[in-house]
Amino acid sequence: MARKKKRKVSSFSLKVLKTGFLFLIVLICVYLLVNYVFRRTVVHNVSMQDTLYDGDNIIMDELSYNISDPKRFDVICFKSYKEKELLIKRVIGLPGETIQIKDGVIFINDKEIKDRSGLSEIEEAGLAKEPVTLSNDEYFVIGDNRKESIDSRSNEVGNVRRKDILGKASFIFWPFNRVGIIK
């Protein structure tokens, strides 16, 4: 009776297999992170200056808003069906609130909100000249560069529906002199 010979896997082959498997796991993790958690996007206008500048490359966190809802003053990325492009603005009004801008001051539910200092003045109230009441799935957004921003104050953008919010603008990674967390 012939004996079957046991094949010995060389230690080199075993290392190659382990390394290949580890590399495959890393590739799958990177793919999942890039496609389902974080997305790179580029700022294409000046509406968020001095927070974000034209040409800034940012990371958009797509996972946060699957767990929780946007909060006041978050910088969000959303798809505008009227503008047909990705827009980046700051959340001012939350679902169910009434927003009005009087003499350059933002009021929410008839109370003045303490806005970030250093932002450009609101010269044009637009649609918010009269009270704007948000439905239970709408947000009111404004760009930090209030003089140059097309946002919820205009018919071109209007109130942002929750389903149109893609993620939170969270990190600037290019240019290198501006690398940091978006506040």
Image (tube, rainbow, N blue to C red):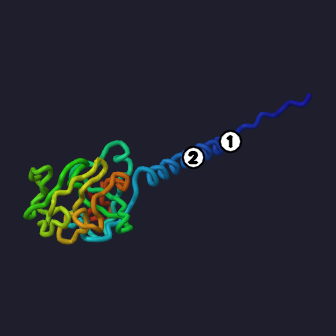
Asked whether residue 113 is in view, the answer is: yes
Q: Residues within 10 Å of mark 2 (few under 14, many from 20)?
A: few
Q: Secondary structure at mark 1?
A: loop
Q: Position of residue 102 (x, y in %)?
A: 9, 61
Q: Position of residue 93 (x, y in %)?
A: 21, 53
The numbered disc on residue 162 is none
Q: Which residue corresponds to the image point at 11% horizontal and 66% vertical from the top-left?
A: 121
The total number of labels drawn is 2
Q: Residue furthest right?
A: 1
Q: Which residue corresponds to the image point at 25% horizontal and 62% vertical from the top-left?
A: 152
Image quarter of the N terminus: top right
Q: Which residue corresponds to the image point at 29% horizontal and 71% vertical from the top-left?
A: 45
Q: Residues within 10 Å of mark 1 (few under 14, many from 20)?
A: few
The numbered disc on residue 10 is 1
Residue 48's image quarter? bottom left
Q: Residue furthest top?
A: 1
Instruction: Give the answer, above or below, for where 97 lies relative to 106.
Output: above
Q: Which residue corresponds to the image point at 38% horizontal and 64% vertical from the top-left?
A: 81
The amino acid on which the numbered mark 2 sits, given as a three-letter code, is Thr
Q: Gap in Å between the C-alphas at discs 1 and 2? A: 14 Å
Q: Nearer the viewer, mark 1 or mark 2?
A: 2
Cβ–Cβ under 8 Å for marks 1 and 2: no
Instruction: Give the answer, above or below, for where 3 lies relative to 29.
Output: above
Instruction: Give the answer, above or below, for where 119 lies relative to 35.
Output: below
**Left or right of residue 25: residue 129:** left
Front one among 42 and 11: 42
Front one among 14 and 67: 67
Q: Which residue is mark 2?
A: 19
The amino acid on which the numbered mark 1 sits, given as a three-letter code, is Ser
Q: Secondary structure at mark 2?
A: helix
**Left or right of residue 45: residue 92:** left
Which badge, 1 or 2, comes first in the chain's sequence?
Answer: 1
